[in-house]
Amino acid sequence: MKHLATLIFLALSIAGFVTVANSQTVTPEALVADLYKAHNSKTRDPFYQTKNRALVDKYFTKSLGDLLWNDAVTSAKNNEVGVLDGDPLYNAQDMEIKNFAIGHADIKGETATVAATFTNFGDKQKLIFHLKIVANVWKVDDIDYGGDVGTLRSWFKNNN
């Protein structure tokens, strides 16, 4: 009976470890890196497309995802430029990206920030990604472009 109790304890411990490990397998930095990779691939890009909402939901919180999705759908339906009139991951319409780097996450409980830095046509840029844990998965909740540019959410707020 003692051996059975030990085996059950070990099995539950391993199951708990696997659950915790799986819930944190994608770090905030890895999510931001994968978002850039998907965006640059054009086949998995969550922006501007209206065919696959899951691509948006993979990277963004529901509230930010709704803003992005609705903007893409509305602008496609009306055949006009939406709120996103440039590239939201580079804050530009024209790009010559060099020295691209993703910083280490600053994690505070269920929120994190990750910096992406690069130069575009010689101008140094720093974007701060704000992430939240949603159902044990990191999601982008906003992007801060710094200075007067504001945040991705503010673009939608100011456009209404």
Image (spheres, grey):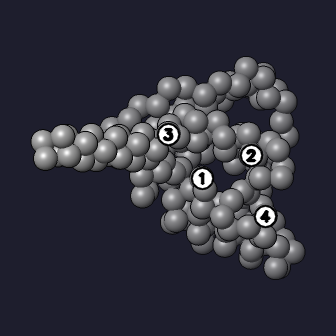
Task: Tell me which corner region of the image, top left, top right, bottom left or bottom right, holds residue 69.
Answer: bottom right
Q: Is residue 147 visible?
A: no
Q: Which residue appears at 52% of the width and 65% of the height?
A: 62
Q: Which residue is mark 1?
A: 59
Are dots 1 and 2 in contact, CB under 8 Å? yes
Question: Does 87 sit left or right of 105 as displayed?
Answer: right
Residue 160 lies, with reference to residue 11, above or below; the image says: below
Which of the labelled discs sits on residue 25, or is there none?
A: 3
Q: Which residue is mark 2?
A: 38
Q: CA distance from mark 4 to mark 1?
A: 14 Å
Look at discs 3 and 2 and give the one toward the viewer: 3
Q: Position of residue 64 (x, y in %)?
A: 55, 61
- Secondary structure at badge 4 equals loop
Return the residue nearer the eye: 98 or 35.
35
Q: CA distance from mark 3 to mark 4?
A: 27 Å
Q: Earlier in the sequence, mark 1 or mark 3?
A: 3
Q: Which residue is mark 4?
A: 49
Q: Earlier in the sequence, mark 4 or mark 1?
A: 4
Q: Earlier in the sequence, mark 1 or mark 2?
A: 2
Are dots 2 and 4 in contact, CB under 8 Å? no
- The amino acid type found where label 3 is placed reads Thr
Q: Position of residue 21 (x, y in %)?
A: 42, 40
Task: Tell me which corner region of the image, top left, top right, bottom left or bottom right, holds residue 127.
Answer: top right
